[in-house]
Amino acid sequence: MEKDELRSKIYSKIDELPTLPVVLPKLLSLMEDNRSNATVIADVISRDPALASKILKVANSAYYGFQQEISDPERAVCLLGFNMVKSLALSIGVIRSLPSDKKSPNFSREGLWIHSLAVATVMEKLSERSCKKNGSDYFFIVGLLHDIGKVVLDQFFTGLFRQALEEVNSMDNTRLHEAERKVIGFDHGEVGAMLLTRWKFPDVISSLIYAHHLTEIPEGISASDIAMLRIADALSQELGLGEEGNPVPPEIRHEDIRTLKMGEAELEDLKAYLHDARDGIYGFFNAVN
């Protein structure tokens, strides 16, 4: 199948998915609005009671470990910060809009979301050392949704995706994104970016997801942001948090460590941080589901 024809088919399948909850487009617009505040965010989220309930469950989970129960969205916004609550709302809204039944026997949706939460946790931690700290509320979203293309492939291209998974499990040193390109013609990063672009997510999010498995980073995409995502992805696999389709974790790329000017001690600290966050990540997952 030609790539243009395949791209059209992917888009047609994406259009079969349910539309996003009505509050999400408003939240997307607020991501780039410096005038947004806790009251505005809480008001938007409260228009979707099911979404608000999920966010409160997450806020009260072991992931955050607050001593007192958080009972309303505005309180959650005040404690977590409105950037984080926006990120949670967008991510939870997207997960709710996707099919939950897996198609491929070698692929676990539950394992994927646990892995993705681990990646999001590391991305959030890495954002603290980023020179773009004040404008980095998208890092958690990127981490949580970086593998969302696998869900699309599993749902709508089941046979081909299963074939890619089987190839990875039967051949040494083959990564899933490489098998996807060989068998399907696109990798899950490209497919995930198609979905988020269709759903009008900001380019800064969809472009990072698009490029995170590319050898050459396209012009205009931050090399440091890509390095953060790759390191977070590799660490989560190394520590066995969730399952994302690769039987063996990748090595962390030296060029990514150099890009972030990260020393060995800092990398070990990051591993320890993620290890300590394990129970909270599973608590977060249970709250969302």
Image (spheres, rainbow, N blue to C red):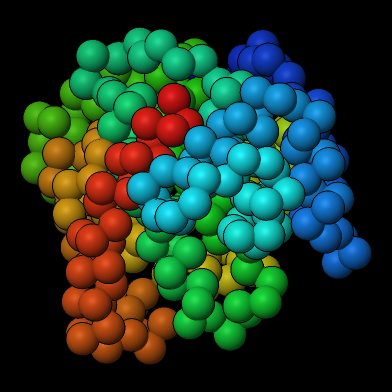
Q: Is residue 269 visible?
A: yes
Q: Residue drawn at (52%, 45%), measured in percent from left and top?
A: 69
Q: Is residue 188 visible?
A: no
259 or 76, which is in the foreground? 76
Pinpoint residue 208: horizontal percent, then vertical percent: 56, 56
Pinpoint residue 15: horizontal percent, then vertical percent: 70, 17
Q: Residue drawn at (50%, 23%), measured in percent from left and top?
A: 152
State whether residue 55 is above or below residue 136: above
State whether residue 14 is above or below residue 179: above
Residue positioned most to the right: 35
Q: Residue drawn at (57%, 23%), measured in percent from left and top?
A: 96
Quarter of the image where one finds residue 27: top right
State whether residue 191 is above or below residue 6: below
Pinpoint residue 37: horizontal percent, then vertical percent: 82, 60
91 or 13, which is in the foreground? 91
Q: Quadrant of the C terminus?
A: top left
On screen, residue 231 versus residue 70, left or right, reads: left
State whether residue 48 is above or below residue 56: above
The number of numbered badges drawn on the structure is 0
Quarter of the image where one finds residue 109: top left
On screen, residue 22 versus residue 241, left or right, reads: right
Pinpoint residue 77: horizontal percent, then vertical percent: 68, 54
79 or 92, which is in the foreground? 79
Q: Residue drawn at (41%, 11%), measured in percent from left and top?
A: 101
